[in-house]
Protein backbone atom coordinates (compact mmCIF):
# COMPACT_ATOMS: atom_id res chain seq x y z
CA UNK A 1 0.00 0.00 0.00
CA UNK A 2 2.81 2.40 0.74
CA UNK A 3 4.45 1.68 -2.60
CA UNK A 4 1.17 2.28 -4.49
CA UNK A 5 0.60 5.48 -2.50
CA UNK A 6 4.11 6.69 -3.44
CA UNK A 7 3.41 6.03 -7.17
CA UNK A 8 0.17 7.98 -6.95
CA UNK A 9 1.94 10.87 -5.19
CA UNK A 10 4.72 10.80 -7.82
CA UNK A 11 2.23 10.80 -10.69
CA UNK A 12 0.24 13.58 -9.09
CA UNK A 13 3.43 15.57 -8.48
CA UNK A 14 4.64 15.08 -12.08
CA UNK A 15 1.23 15.86 -13.58
CA UNK A 16 0.78 19.03 -11.50
CA UNK A 17 4.42 20.00 -12.06
CA UNK A 18 3.98 19.57 -15.79
CA UNK A 19 0.88 21.79 -15.75
CA UNK A 20 2.67 24.39 -13.62
CA UNK A 21 5.62 24.37 -16.04
CA UNK A 22 3.32 24.83 -19.03
CA UNK A 23 1.48 27.69 -17.34
CA UNK A 24 4.77 29.36 -16.37
CA UNK A 25 6.01 29.03 -19.97
CA UNK A 26 2.81 30.57 -21.33
CA UNK A 27 3.01 33.40 -18.82
CA UNK A 28 6.65 34.09 -19.74
CA UNK A 29 5.84 34.10 -23.47
CA UNK A 30 2.87 36.41 -22.95
CA UNK A 31 4.96 38.73 -20.79
CA UNK A 32 7.72 38.88 -23.39
CA UNK A 33 5.24 39.71 -26.17
CA UNK A 34 3.53 42.35 -24.03
CA UNK A 35 6.88 43.84 -22.97
CA UNK A 36 8.03 44.07 -26.57
CA UNK A 37 4.85 45.84 -27.65
CA UNK A 38 4.77 48.25 -24.71
CA UNK A 39 8.45 49.20 -25.02
CA UNK A 40 8.91 52.36 -27.07
CA UNK A 41 11.07 52.14 -30.15
CA UNK A 42 14.02 54.48 -29.83
CA UNK A 43 16.06 56.15 -32.59
CA UNK A 44 19.25 58.20 -32.72
CA UNK A 45 19.15 61.98 -33.01
CA UNK A 46 21.49 64.93 -32.53
CA UNK A 47 20.72 67.57 -29.94
CA UNK A 48 21.51 70.80 -31.85
CA UNK A 49 22.08 72.70 -28.61
CA UNK A 50 24.83 70.27 -27.56
CA UNK A 51 26.45 69.59 -30.97
CA UNK A 52 29.91 71.16 -31.42
CA UNK A 53 30.03 70.63 -35.22
CA UNK A 54 33.17 68.51 -34.89
CA UNK A 55 32.81 66.80 -38.30
CA UNK A 56 32.67 63.23 -36.96
CA UNK A 57 29.21 62.67 -38.45
CA UNK A 58 30.70 62.70 -41.94
CA UNK A 59 33.43 60.18 -41.19
CA UNK A 60 32.15 57.80 -38.50
CA UNK A 61 28.77 56.75 -39.96
CA UNK A 62 28.72 53.10 -41.10
CA UNK A 63 27.00 54.17 -44.31
CA UNK A 64 29.01 55.33 -47.31
CA UNK A 65 27.06 58.62 -47.26
CA UNK A 66 26.31 59.65 -43.69
CA UNK A 67 22.70 59.55 -42.48
CA UNK A 68 23.40 62.90 -40.82
CA UNK A 69 22.41 65.89 -42.93
CA UNK A 70 22.44 69.64 -42.49
CA UNK A 71 19.02 71.25 -42.18
CA UNK A 72 18.02 74.87 -41.96
CA UNK A 73 15.57 76.54 -39.64
CA UNK A 74 14.22 79.20 -41.97
CA UNK A 75 12.40 81.00 -39.14
CA UNK A 76 15.72 82.34 -37.79
CA UNK A 77 17.68 82.67 -41.05
CA UNK A 78 18.65 86.24 -41.94
CA UNK A 79 18.65 85.60 -45.72
CA UNK A 80 21.93 87.50 -45.86
CA UNK A 81 23.91 88.30 -49.00
CA UNK A 82 27.09 87.25 -47.19
CA UNK A 83 26.04 84.08 -45.41
CA UNK A 84 28.94 82.56 -43.50
CA UNK A 85 27.34 79.13 -43.63
CA UNK A 86 27.59 79.42 -47.40
CA UNK A 87 30.81 81.41 -47.87
CA UNK A 88 34.21 80.88 -46.29
CA UNK A 89 35.02 83.27 -43.46
CA UNK A 90 37.60 85.87 -44.45
CA UNK A 91 37.70 85.21 -48.20
CA UNK A 92 40.48 86.76 -50.29
CA UNK A 93 37.84 88.81 -52.07
CA UNK A 94 34.29 89.46 -50.91
CA UNK A 95 32.40 87.80 -53.73
CA UNK A 96 30.17 84.78 -54.18
CA UNK A 97 32.39 82.82 -56.55
CA UNK A 98 32.58 79.04 -56.23
CA UNK A 99 36.09 79.29 -54.79
CA UNK A 100 34.57 81.06 -51.78
CA UNK A 101 31.90 78.43 -51.05
CA UNK A 102 32.40 76.76 -47.68
CA UNK A 103 30.63 73.45 -48.47
CA UNK A 104 33.09 70.94 -49.97
CA UNK A 105 30.34 69.23 -52.00
CA UNK A 106 28.29 72.26 -53.08
CA UNK A 107 25.27 71.02 -51.10
CA UNK A 108 24.07 74.53 -50.25
CA UNK A 109 22.09 76.14 -53.04
CA UNK A 110 21.83 79.92 -53.05
CA UNK A 111 18.73 81.50 -54.60
CA UNK A 112 18.17 85.22 -55.11
CA UNK A 113 14.93 86.55 -53.57
CA UNK A 114 15.28 90.34 -53.89
CA UNK A 115 18.12 92.71 -53.22
CA UNK A 116 19.84 92.10 -50.75
CA UNK A 117 18.12 88.84 -49.73
CA UNK A 118 19.01 85.27 -50.64
CA UNK A 119 17.53 81.94 -49.64
CA UNK A 120 19.83 79.03 -48.87
CA UNK A 121 18.63 75.46 -49.37
CA UNK A 122 20.40 72.21 -48.54
CA UNK A 123 20.59 69.49 -51.20
CA UNK A 124 20.57 66.48 -48.88
CA UNK A 125 21.83 64.14 -51.60
CA UNK A 126 25.06 66.15 -51.75
CA UNK A 127 25.36 66.84 -48.01
CA UNK A 128 27.90 64.62 -46.23
CA UNK A 129 27.26 65.93 -42.70
CA UNK A 130 30.70 67.54 -42.33
CA UNK A 131 29.18 70.43 -40.31
CA UNK A 132 31.47 73.11 -41.76
CA UNK A 133 28.46 75.27 -42.63
CA UNK A 134 26.85 74.60 -39.25
CA UNK A 135 29.95 75.68 -37.38
CA UNK A 136 30.41 78.86 -39.43
CA UNK A 137 26.72 79.75 -39.14
CA UNK A 138 26.89 79.35 -35.35
CA UNK A 139 30.08 81.43 -35.00
CA UNK A 140 29.40 84.21 -37.49
CA UNK A 141 25.64 84.01 -38.10
CA UNK A 142 22.44 83.24 -36.27
CA UNK A 143 22.69 79.45 -36.00
CA UNK A 144 19.92 78.61 -38.46
CA UNK A 145 21.89 75.62 -39.82
CA UNK A 146 22.18 72.45 -37.73
CA UNK A 147 22.60 68.69 -38.13
CA UNK A 148 19.94 65.99 -37.90
CA UNK A 149 19.86 62.24 -38.37
CA UNK A 150 17.61 61.43 -41.32
CA UNK A 151 15.70 58.33 -40.28
CA UNK A 152 14.89 57.28 -43.84
CA UNK A 153 18.66 56.76 -44.28
CA UNK A 154 19.76 55.71 -40.77
CA UNK A 155 20.15 52.01 -39.95
CA UNK A 156 19.45 52.79 -36.25
CA UNK A 157 22.45 50.73 -35.15
CA UNK A 158 22.26 49.56 -31.55
CA UNK A 159 25.74 50.95 -30.97
CA UNK A 160 25.97 53.95 -33.27
CA UNK A 161 29.57 54.58 -34.31
CA UNK A 162 28.93 58.32 -34.59
CA UNK A 163 27.45 58.41 -31.08
CA UNK A 164 30.55 56.61 -29.77
CA UNK A 165 32.83 59.15 -31.49
CA UNK A 166 30.79 62.23 -30.55
CA UNK A 167 32.97 64.34 -28.22
CA UNK A 168 30.07 66.40 -26.85
CA UNK A 169 27.54 63.61 -26.26
CA UNK A 170 25.09 65.30 -28.66
CA UNK A 171 23.87 61.95 -30.05
CA UNK A 172 20.91 60.75 -28.00
CA UNK A 173 18.26 58.04 -28.14
CA UNK A 174 14.82 59.59 -28.54
CA UNK A 175 11.36 58.02 -28.94
CA UNK A 176 10.58 57.13 -32.57
CA UNK A 177 7.23 58.92 -32.31
CA UNK A 178 9.15 62.20 -31.63
CA UNK A 179 12.34 61.64 -33.63
CA UNK A 180 13.56 65.20 -34.20
CA UNK A 181 15.24 67.57 -31.78
CA UNK A 182 14.90 71.07 -33.17
CA UNK A 183 16.71 74.25 -32.36
CA UNK A 184 14.48 76.61 -30.44
CA UNK A 185 13.38 79.83 -32.10
CA UNK A 186 13.95 82.73 -29.74
CA UNK A 187 10.89 84.97 -30.15
CA UNK A 188 11.94 87.39 -27.38
CA UNK A 189 13.48 90.69 -28.39
Image (cartoon, helix red, strand yellow):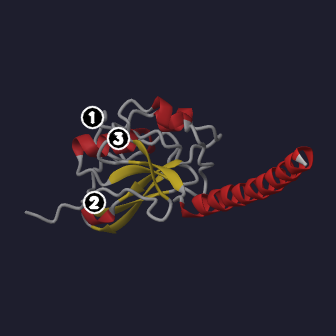
Can see residue 150?
no
Q: Are marks 1 and 3 in contact (CB under 8 Å)?
A: no
Q: Quadrant of the C terminus?
A: bottom left
Q: Position of residue 138 (x, y in %)?
A: 27, 44
In front of the other: label 3 or label 2? 3
Badge count: 3
In front of the other: label 1 or label 3? 3
Can see residue 76?
yes
> Looking at the image, which is closer to me, 169 or 11?
11
Q: Which residue is mark 2?
A: 77
Give residue 111's quadrant in the image.
bottom left
Above or below, 151 relative to 65? below
Q: Is residue 30 left or right of residue 185?
A: right
Identify the residue at horizontal 70%, vertical 55% (top origin): 24
> Looking at the image, which is closer to me, 99 or 186?
186
Above or below, 114 relative to 40? below
* Disc with the residue nearer the chain's start (3 vs 2): 3
Q: Identify the secondary structure beneath mark 3.
A: loop
* Disc with the residue nearer the chain's start (2 vs 1): 2
Q: Is residue 174 left or right of residue 134?
A: right
Identify the residue at horizontal 41%, vertical 41% (top origin): 131
Q: Which residue is mark 3?
A: 51
Identify the residue at horizontal 37%, vertical 50% (top origin): 146
> Looking at the image, which is closer to me, 83 or 171?
171
Q: Which residue is mark 1?
A: 90
Q: Position of residue 119 (x, y in %)?
A: 35, 63
Amino acid sequence: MTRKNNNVNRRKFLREGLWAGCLAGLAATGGAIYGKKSRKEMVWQIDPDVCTSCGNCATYCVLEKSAVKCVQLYAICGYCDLCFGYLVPEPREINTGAENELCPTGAIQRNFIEDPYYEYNIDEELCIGCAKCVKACAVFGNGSLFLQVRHDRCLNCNECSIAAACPSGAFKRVPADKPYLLREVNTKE
